[in-house]
Image (cartoon, rainbow, N blue to C red):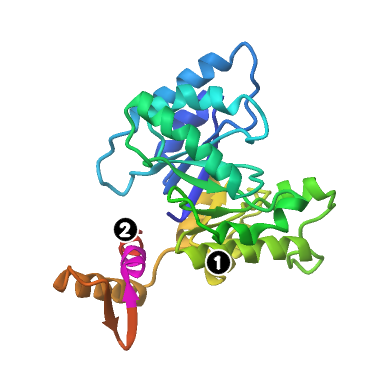
Amino acid sequence: MRSWLTIKGNSAAQLAKAPVIGADTLVVDMSLVPDDENAAQVRADVAEWFSSFREQLSTPKSFKRWLRIKPLDGTHWIDDLSVIMAGAPDGLIVPKCTGPEQVRMLASELYEIEQRHGVGHNATKIIPQIGETPGSALTLRDYTDDPHPRLAGFAWNAEGLAREIGAQRTRTDDGRWCDTMRLVRGTTILLAKTLGLLAIETSVRDPKDLQTGALAARRARQDGFTGMAANHPRQVALINDAFKPTANERAEAQAIVDLFASTPSVAMVNHKGTMVDRTGLEQAEQLLELV
């Protein structure tokens, strides 16, 4: 899943247009949707949107459906989930996640909500946006202690982190990440790689700056991210292109898949002198799904 396009949950136009843009993952954002007199209708509309794309044909236009919920230190996220989970999102992105204890708390709530809506147990995955507060940035290592089975990866948010710490910039004058941003960004990659999960790069703020967007996407892939967030449709093609596997990468991935297919009962295979486990097989299969 290379491109993660965020669309507003209370924008009927964005919900209608997003499925044909070409993003690998569409993230319906409820985090900034106000809980006012229109909230019930927004929740119902978003639930219907998820339901309408629940069963997709395996075509290049198919996409994953994720929901970005409100921060868990508030109260209305549970009201949103109680309705929207009827559409069985593939996963939830948790903004301003303070640590693994919030992941466990959310997972506990999901267990009951999934049962209520007939969704399979542990079917809804979780990706926390990490390090968005000073305190949480200092405890990121805790995610490796008994990681929850719902965890699918980690994401980070440069603009959100800057706001929380009162920083006036995220990059230096020469375009490099500032020290605090670099710390959280690097830890996002390390956590994901340690646990064999997805690592999602933060979005580029200005969608009109295509040159910066393309460069950021290339660097994200070179640095080990598996995908990148987009805040505008015009960024999707740049990200997909940057993360598109080369012919050699596809050949290597196919070789790993073939090795496991020839000996399906083994836990590991030897590929050119390197032992590859089932996590490596999953990564190879995911790479082959990219177009």
Q: Identify which residue, 174 or 108, lies in the foreground.
A: 108
- Quadrant of the frame with the C terminus: bottom left
Based on the displayed image, in which of its 4 quarters is residue 170 positioned?
bottom right
Circle 1 SS class: helix
Q: Where is residue 134 in the image (x, y as percent from the top left)?
A: 77, 52
Going by the numbered disc 2, the residue's amino acid type is: Glu
Residue at image coords 57%, 30%: 30
Going from N to C along the chain, the mark reached first, 2 or 1, is 1
Measure the C-alpha gap from mark 2 to mark 1: 19 Å
132 within the magenta span: no
279 within the magenta span: yes
Instruction: Tell me, yes or no, if residue 211 can be seen here.
Output: no
| Magenta-tinted stretch | 276-284
Circle 2 SS class: helix
Location of residue 21 with respect to 190 vertically, above or below = above
Q: Position of residue 241 (x, y in %)?
A: 46, 61
Q: Where is residue 98 in the image (x, y as percent from the top left)?
A: 66, 46
Instruction: Tell me, yes or no, if residue 277 can be seen here.
Output: yes
Q: For residue 218, which numbered disc appears in the image?
A: 1
Classify residue 152 as left or right of residue 144.
Answer: left
Location of residue 77 with respect to 3 vertically, above or below = above
Q: Nearer the viewer, mark 2 or mark 1?
A: 2
Classify residue 253 as left or right of residue 193.
Answer: left
Judging by the rendered image, the residue that carries numbered circle 2 is 289
Residue at image coords 33%, 67%: 284
Q: Where is residue 124 in the image (x, y as percent from the top left)?
A: 41, 40
